[in-house]
Amino acid sequence: MLVYIVDKNGNHLMPTRRLGKVRRWLKQGQAVIVSHAPFTIKLLFETGDCIQPLTLGIDTGYKTVGISVISSKQELLSAEIQLRTDVSEKLTDKRMYRRSRRNWLRYRQPRFLNRKKAISLVPSVLHKINSHLRIIKWVKSWLPVAKIVIEMGNFDPHKLKNPEIQGIEYQQGEQWGYENLKAYILDRDGHQCYFYQAKGNCSEKMHVHHIVYRSSGGTDAPSNLITLCEKHHALVHKNRLKLGIVQFKSLKSATIMNIVNNQLCHKLPTAQTTFGYMTKILRTQLGLAKSHANDAYVIAGSNDQQRLPTLKLLFKRKNDRSLQKQPLKGG
Ligand SMILES: [Zn+2]
Ligand SMILES: [Zn+2]
């Protein structure tokens, strides 16, 4: 267990594992508890500054956000946070209730052009962006975070268009380039097998298949690549299944995450960025299972730090407007 500490002036200090010391401080009145979850104490005596630079890694997501805060030696926070996915549904309900409420009026003056400005983003997307920003603010409110690293989607679009880009992360050889391409194809096809709708019964593991085989001169161009599950992939190679004319579709959640990631980058100009395909390679090298918390740990810059158990958190509505929903009958 970790105990988080703020100093006399409310500045954040490094968390501690030394529970005996904390107990002694509390008993002797040298510290007070300011929060139980996460457990945070405030020191009442003067301390020297002893802050190490901490890095916050964020695995952004449509439904689940993974976060991890690490120092050079240990992980100080690991959490997975569920976002709300009911925003658009709730707004539809709200619209319906408003309609029925207004139907109670005998006459309502027509109102035209009474909106101040056009809304730029739909509320459900806005919720996703604001949730990510709220999470960062929440972490920063009790840990001295110096650096933020965000995963900007699964693949790097600049590198797809221009594979010769120079940079440290691009000097990792051919594997990185191909993993990036694979991540793009899987994203484009929504991590779903081409035969999913027609045949069903897909196996879990997804492969990327060359429509025109490489041996027949097929290229690595995205238009020649498609997502197949392991089972159907094997059948295609045995000529027992035929690919028809392939139409690529794009996934709604992928498009939304693109907007969210771009907006986050805009709002957090000092944050560093990374991509999902790199996270995947590094996570595999570390032998970690796929989870949002593990991804966040890798994104933050994993380096054999002592890990923490993952907190599971949930975004809740601040206000359930059930009282405002129905007009009171006869009231
Ligand atoms: Zn399949
Ligand atoms: Zn194949």
Image (cartoon, rainbow, N blue to C red):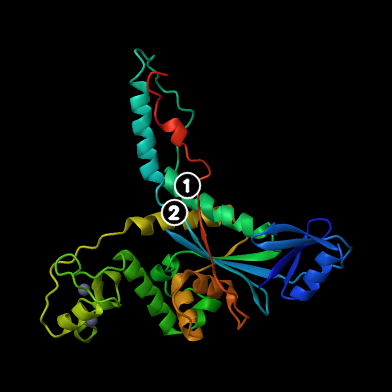
Which residue type does callout 1 highlight?
A: Leu
- Of residues 317 and 288, the one nearer the viewer is 317
Relative image position of residue 19 (x, y in whole percent): 74, 74
Q: Quadrant of residue 120?
A: top left
- Of residues 145 and 224, the one nearer the viewer is 145
Q: Taking the image as four quarters, which one is ligand 1 found in?
A: bottom left
Give the Cα separation between the discs numbered 2 and 1.
10 Å
Relative image position of residue 304 (x, y in whole percent): 60, 83
How many callouts does the rendering have? 2
Q: Name the residue under label 1.
A: 126
Which residue type does callout 2 highlight?
A: Ile
Instruction: Classify 10 Å Cα crowding around label 1: few (below 14), some (14-19), many (20 and above).
Output: some
- Of residues 213 and 188, the one nearer the viewer is 188
Which element carries disc 2, helix, strand or loop?
A: helix
Give the answer, above or below, for where 33 lies relative to 86. Answer: below
Say which mark, if any, is on residue 259. 2
- Of residues 81 and 303, the one nearer the viewer is 81
- In this rendering, the label closer to the viewer, 2 or 1: 1
- Is residue 59 something that shows in the picture? no
Relative image position of residue 66 (x, y in whole percent): 51, 66
| Precedes in sequence: disc 2 or disc 1 | 1
Residue situated furthest right in the rendering: 46
